[in-house]
Image: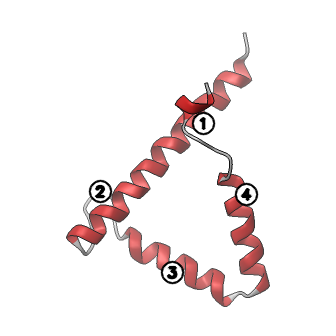
Amino acid sequence: MDMFGHVKNVVRELIDISLVLIALAIVLSILVGGTLPFFGNVVTNLTDLVGKLGSNGLVGLIVLGVILWLFSGRGTAVARK
């Protein structure tokens, strides 16, 4: 049995689900406005993160590049099968 492969697939599925929930939270927060009960204040947290990365200059760009690299090339779990 390929236990590590199974664990990797489970982690990929969890990441896919969390990215969909983040996107849903952003859309709902924009439509409804304010803090949502389950999702919190996602838009404010994201703008704070972008502001912190932007204020750190080169280090912020490097961190942003690493984050983009981590998520690049990742389709949905269905597309990888």
How packed mark 2 is, by other alpha carbons closer than 10 Å (few <14, some 14-19, many 20 or more), is few
Q: Is residue 71 left or right of residue 57?
A: left
Q: Secondary structure at mark 1?
A: helix
Q: Do tag 4 and tag 3 residues touch (Cβ < 8 Å)?
A: no
Q: How much space separates mark 1 and mark 3, taking CA atoms?
A: 27 Å
**Where is residue 52 shown, x and y percent of the image?**
61, 83
- Where residue 61 appears, x then y in whole percent? 73, 77
Q: Earlier in the sequence, mark 1 or mark 2?
A: 1
Q: Which numbered disc covers residue 48?
A: 3
* Number of the label disc, if any, that sits on residue 38: 2
Q: Are marks 3 and 2 in contact (CB under 8 Å)?
A: no
Pinpoint residue 18: horizontal percent, then vertical percent. 47, 48
The residue located at (65%, 53%) in the rendering is 71
Q: Residue furthest left?
A: 32
Left or right, residue 37 beside residue 2 = left
* Separation (CA) of disc 2 from disc 4: 29 Å
Q: Give the quarter of the image for residue 41.
A: bottom left
Q: Which residue appears at 73% of the width and 24% of the height? A: 4
Nearer the observer: mark 1 or 4; the answer is 4
Image disc number at residue 11: 1
Q: Quadrant of residue 39?
A: bottom left
The Cα–Cα distance between marks 3 and 2, rounded to whole angstroms, is: 19 Å
Residue 69 shows which numbered tag? 4
Three-letter code, disc 3: Asp
Mark positioned earlier in the residue sequence (2 or 4) = 2
